[in-house]
Image (spheres, rainbow, N blue to C red):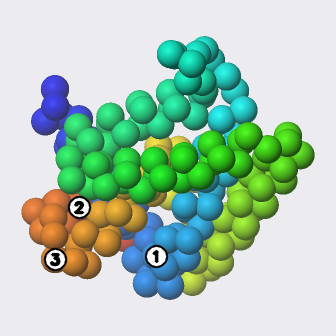
Amino acid sequence: MLHGLRAWFIEQLAMYAGYHRDRRNQLTHHVGVPLIAFSLILGLTQIPITQVDGYPLTAASVFLAVLFALYIVAVPLTGILTAIFYGALYGFALKIATGSAETVWTVAGAAFVGGWVIQFVGHAFERRRPAFTVNLVQAFMAPPHLIAEMLFGLGLEKDLEAEVQSRAVKYFATAT
């Protein structure tokens, strides 16, 4: 089962890689994706679920726990680093979440819109629509893929890089 999950996950990373080949597009995503993720995390902090030992459990904490578990099981090093980075965004979101509703939603809205503007600029360079418009799962592949790209650039995770790149070729379609 774990092998099947890893294979599926790597296939999703490969699709993401196939839609993000232009270096300018990749760079815009290193800004836009964290902004969008932060905005969604911040918004989800506003949905309380329960309290655990006095700590509020929100939709954000549950959602992130599930995503992080998936990332870590499928691609351990990349998953752990993704959890650390996006966990820091969660910590920042929790600080802002203590403010007024107006502040929370203004910050979340600005980050969301700004992130998407940056993303679409990147896709203009790529001359290809975003991968999530073909496969919604791709929206959740951006964070680990961006971390993986950084690891690849540092010469780490070479086996993962080779596997992603060998599978990505089938997604190198002409501009759409």
Task: Nearest to the eye among marks 2 and 3: give it.
Answer: 3
On the rendered structure, is 71 left or right of 76? right
User: Answer yes or no: do the residues labelled 3 and 1 have beta carbons within 8 Å?
Assistant: no
Which disc number belongs to residue 155? Answer: 3
Q: Please state which amino acid type lies under the numbered disc 1.
A: Gln
The residue located at (74%, 52%) in the rendering is 108
Spatial CA span between label 2 and label 1: 16 Å
According to the picture, the residue beneath numbered tag 2 turns out to be 164
Q: CA distance from mark 3 to mark 1?
A: 18 Å
Q: Residue 143's quadrant in the figure? A: bottom left
- The vertical placement of 56 against 152, above or below, is above
Instruction: Determine whether the residue tagged by mark 2 lies in a helix, strand or loop.
Output: helix
- Camera-side residue of 92 and 80: 92
Q: Callout 2, which amino acid?
A: Val
**In front: label 3 or label 1:** 3
In x, y percent, where is residue 156? 16, 70
